[in-house]
Image (cartoon, rainbow, N blue to C red):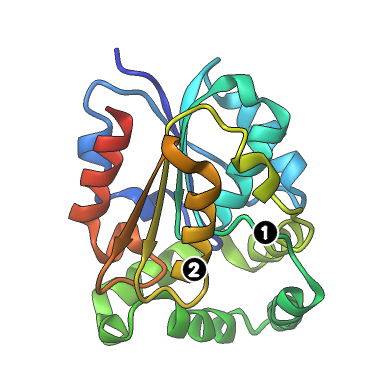
């Protein structure tokens, strides 16, 4: 059996975020999708993840999933065999980055979660995909599954994230850093910074024509990169 894989979805996303990759990744490999909508701190999310995960595993996270992955490395680095960081950032939360999150929390708590999902959609994908209705409905379906309360818990967890850049230089495991070239939420420069800190143990993949949801926007490219990373 191949080494187990833990997948961590992004904000307001569930296992469907990785559905296009699933057939290839699950071929002879056990996969766990992290439950990351029931706790409002990264520490608690990761304690839940580690309790459910096998003793050692490859770890892949997209966006918020990357923030969770960094916390896994803080709590149990010895359990992670390799790391994939998709459309994410190692930078800490700041008052500036937290302000729009506070505004979205306010909307969600006032019963305007529909407005939140509509606003987020405008930034989640490359401009050319904004009219992709099946993709929009898939993203909306994931958000509805997480729900407003889960969304608020996730935002509160993200807003407390520390600076993860210092740990990158010390990693001795294979690292994939992948980003959509048109990602507005976690831009290419942030992926380049992470890859630079990882150095020779890492691989940087910049995907043209892709925004923040790389696994859904360019699934074949992401699947190929993940299979290469997994060896």
User: What residue lies at 34% left-to-right and 62% top-to-bottom?
Assistant: 214
For disc 1, the neighbor class at 10 Å (few under 14, some 14 to 19, many from 20) is many
Nearer to the camera, 1 or 58? 58
The answer to whether residue 80 of the structure is visible from this angle is yes
- Number of marks in the image? 2
- Residue 107 rendering spot, x and y as whole percentages: 70, 83
Residue 90 picture location, percent across and down: 62, 55
Q: Give yes or no for contact between labels 1 and 2 (Cβ–Cβ under 8 Å).
A: no
Residue 52 placement, left or right of 145: right
Distance from label 1 to label 2 (Cα)? 25 Å
**Picture coordinates of residue 14, whole percent (x, y):** 46, 53
Judged by depth in the image, the label closer to the viewer, 1 or 2, is 2
Secondary structure beneath label 2: helix
Where does the N terminus fall, quadrant-wise?
top left
- The quarter of the picture where residue 28 lies is top left
Does residue 145 appear anywhere in the picture?
A: no
Q: Secondary structure at mark 1?
A: helix
Q: Which residue is mark 2?
A: 189
Residue at (39, 61) in percent of width and height: 179
Quadrant of the image containing the C terminus: top left
Please tell me whether residue 44 is drawn above or below residue 215 in the rendered image.
above
Q: Tag 2: Cα neighbours inside 10 Å, few (<14), some, or many (≥20)?
A: few
Front residue of 212 and 148: 212
Q: Is residue 230 above or below residue 62?
A: above
Residue 178 lies left or right of residue 196; in this view the side is left
> Which residue is at the front of the view, 95 or 6?
95
Disc number for residue 154: 1
Q: Please, is residue 125 above or below residue 33 in the view?
A: below
Give percent across and percent down for residue 66.
55, 50
| Mark 1 or mark 2: whose residue is earlier in sequence | 1
Residue 40's disc is: none
């Amino acid at each position: 059996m191949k080494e187990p894989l833990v997948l961590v979805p992004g904000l307001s996303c569930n296992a469907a975020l990785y559905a296009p990759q699933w057939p290839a990744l699950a071929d002879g490999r056990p996969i766990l999708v992290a439950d990351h909508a029931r706790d409002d701190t990264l520490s608690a999310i990761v304690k839940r993840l580690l309790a459910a995960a096998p003793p050692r595993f490859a770890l892949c996270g997209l966006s918020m999933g990357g923030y969770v992955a960094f916390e896994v490395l803080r709590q149990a680095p010895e359990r992670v065999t390799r790391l994939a960081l998709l459309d994410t950032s190692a930078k800490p939360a700041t008052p500036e980055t937290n302000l729009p999150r506070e505004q979205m929390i306010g909307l969600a708590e006032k019963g305007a979660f529909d407005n939140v999902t509509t606003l987020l959609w405008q930034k989640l994908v490359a401009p050319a995909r904004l009219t992709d209705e099946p993709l929009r409905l898939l993203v909306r379906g994931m958000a509805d599954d997480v729900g407003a309360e889960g969304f608020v818990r996730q935002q509160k967890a993200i807003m407390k994230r520390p600076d993860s850049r210092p740990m990158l230089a010390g990693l001795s495991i294979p690292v994939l850093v992948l980003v959509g070239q048109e990602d507005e939420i976690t831009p290419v420069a942030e992926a380049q910074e992470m890859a630079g800190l990882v150095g020779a143990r890492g691989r940087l993949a910049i995907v043209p024509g892709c925004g923040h949801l790389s696994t859904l926007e360019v699934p074949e490219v992401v699947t190929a990169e993940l299979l290469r990373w997994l060896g």
